[in-house]
Image (tube, rainbow, N blue to C red):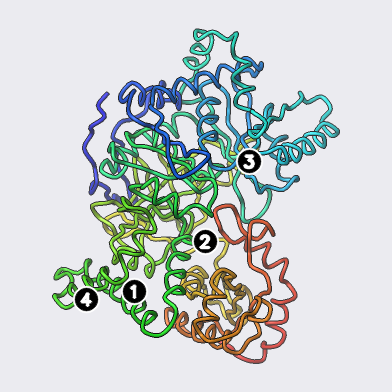
Amino acid sequence: MSTGTPSVAGSPAVVDGVATSPLIQEPDSTWTIPWLLADRVARTPDAPIIERKSQLGDSWTRISARAFGEEVTRVAAGLVGMGLAPGASVSIMARTSYEWTLLDMAIARAGLVSVPIYETDSAEQVEWILADADVRLVITESAALAELVRSAVSVNASTLPDRPCVRVLSLDHDAISSISTAGQEVTRAELDARTNALSAEDLYTIIYTSGTTGRPKGVELTHGTVAGLAWNGVRWIPDLLNSSSTRLLLFLPLAHSYARFLQTLAIAGNGTLGHTPDVTTLLPDLKAFGPSYVLAVPRVLEKIYNAADARAGSGARLKTFRWAAKVAIEYSRALDTPEGPSRRLRAAHALADRLVFRTIRALLGPNARYAISGGGPLGQRLGHFYRGLGLVILEGYGLTETIGPTTVNLDVRNKIGTVGPPVCGNEVRVGPDGELEVRGLGVFTRYHNDPEGTAESFTDDGWFRTGDIGDIDEDGWVRITGRKKDLIVTAGGKNVAPSILEDRLRGHPLVSQVLVIGDGEPFISALITLDTEMLPQWLKNHGLPEMDVSEAALHPDVLGALDRAVARTNRAVSRAESIRTYRVLPTDFTEANGLLTPSLKVKRAKVLERYADTVAQIYASTRKGPQE
């Protein structure tokens, strides 16, 4: 099998309204996650596959592909030795770490099914996942999480008395050692028989959707889907993903499909993977590990921009930063024109690079050239800003149901404002109502124990309904314009995509989250939360005294700044789509209070439920005011 397949960049096409791209190689029945790791070990046994951060200091220890494969085998043997039958479900409820990847690979090697659980999941969510997936073993990060799981297990035991017992281990109480010890009597032949019995059609994982509404659904993904997409994926953009110099530092939760698939890509390629579980050490870890590309969600990229703006302070420094930001955006836009940047713009860009851009790029580490953005819309403003300062943002699009990218921009052709063309055998089309529909290698098979939900999610001719509204250009590049269920229809019948307004308004340093509302109402309004990290610096920059969020939400200078930000935001839309009024909420949306998903998406229904009185007041007090 060749590992040097040339890039197929540029080959996506549109045929009869369907954007499509070829597979480099069609997976066969032997393509599984253990096969993917074995292929890496066979190709580069002595090269590093992972670098593990030391407990003390900033040093990183290299782990070769061969050594990692051997440790995976020991842990997999332990899982067999614990009496777990082929196909049994095992949950990991832990932060992003070396141990998470080790367990994931070992679970697959033992012929078991991994079921991730977020550390932030509630007891009710944990109880549901354990019962729905029939989980037999749970490995948690800590003893405290283990107790939460045990309480959920006891609830299930009382309602499902005939269900087999669930064993719970924690990483801080030597879970890995305990599992490995249980495998001392398991022979290599016995373990290999388990692994070799797997086929591409077998279930690899059940990932429960973080869900902005309703009970999480269990997305079933097969070995062939994940291994096939990963093997093809690293050869789709080889310079970025399949080089020995490729380095990826994971900090997003591995319980989410976005980070999970990038982990698999790292194993399928030739580069090195690292983990940083603590975001408070992210910047020094980026500097020490030196990733060649960064995995991010739009909110992280937004915060980097806002932090740079806030730290510029006031006066000349702030003017310099904002001038440089405008230069970056103008320069990036000029790259897309036939004539390119003018001589004046190139000179301004060179000066801005010396004064501002180098400092921001340094935050991402010494080797970072690319950032893959997913998990939500990035927006043109940020895309052009980062490309203008010298970091190529490859924005992509995917869902849990597609495990990884359905589409992604290419390193050789990057259209800012789009999510790129389909990748690796995927196909995308626009349905009659504007909804994007996909099919191909990366699409899931079914929802676990939910045949009705599965049937509703597919068209009669087998295309998955994504729930997103978008369009496809003549080259096959896809643009997302909104979420179908989030589309606002005002009382006057105007369709409004809230993401356009929300993206622009979040660009202000004071703003953390925005929820645009107005469905069935006479006009559009917004709920806004303040960024507690940015607020102190903003107040200082504007000569204002220290105050908490509740005080700031009522201060005339803060409200004046937000008024101006809303006015700038409204320039992007028609008057009927513009924000007429807003309310500043006293509390931010977070995972902890149940208003954000782990991928930092706002749970719209939950916010509207919690702040129903605020929404009612907006429209009760102004219904006789502004009209469309």
Marking on residue 325:
1
Disc 4 vs disc 3: which is toward the camera?
4
Which residue is located at x 86 percent, y 33 percent?
158
Q: In what element is the residue under mark 3?
A: loop
Which of marks 3 and 4 precedes in the sequence? Answer: 3
Check residue 348 in the rendering and tell me which mark sits there, or answer none.
4
Q: Position of residue 430 (x, y in %)?
A: 41, 56
Q: Which residue is mark 2?
A: 483
Q: Is residue 482 left or right of residue 178?
A: left
| Residue 9 or residue 330, whichever sits in front | 330
- Separation of marks 1 and 4 at Cα, in angstroms: 11 Å
Position of 350 compared to 39: left or right? Answer: left
| Residue 597, image quadrant | bottom right
Name the residue that disc number 3 marks: 117
Disc 4 versus disc 3: distance between alpha carbons? 49 Å
- Of residues 383 and 370, which is closer to you in this image? 370
Query: In the rendering, at what x and y percent does residue 338 appear?
Result: 15, 68
Distance CA(mark 3)–CA(mark 2): 25 Å
Question: Is mark 3 in CB contact (under 8 Å) with mark 1?
Answer: no
Which amino acid does the dot numbered 4 rest on?
Ala
Three-letter amino acid code at disc 2?
Arg
Q: Position of residue 61 (x, y in %)?
A: 42, 34
* Local secondary structure at mark 2: strand
Q: Quadrant of residue 580?
A: bottom right
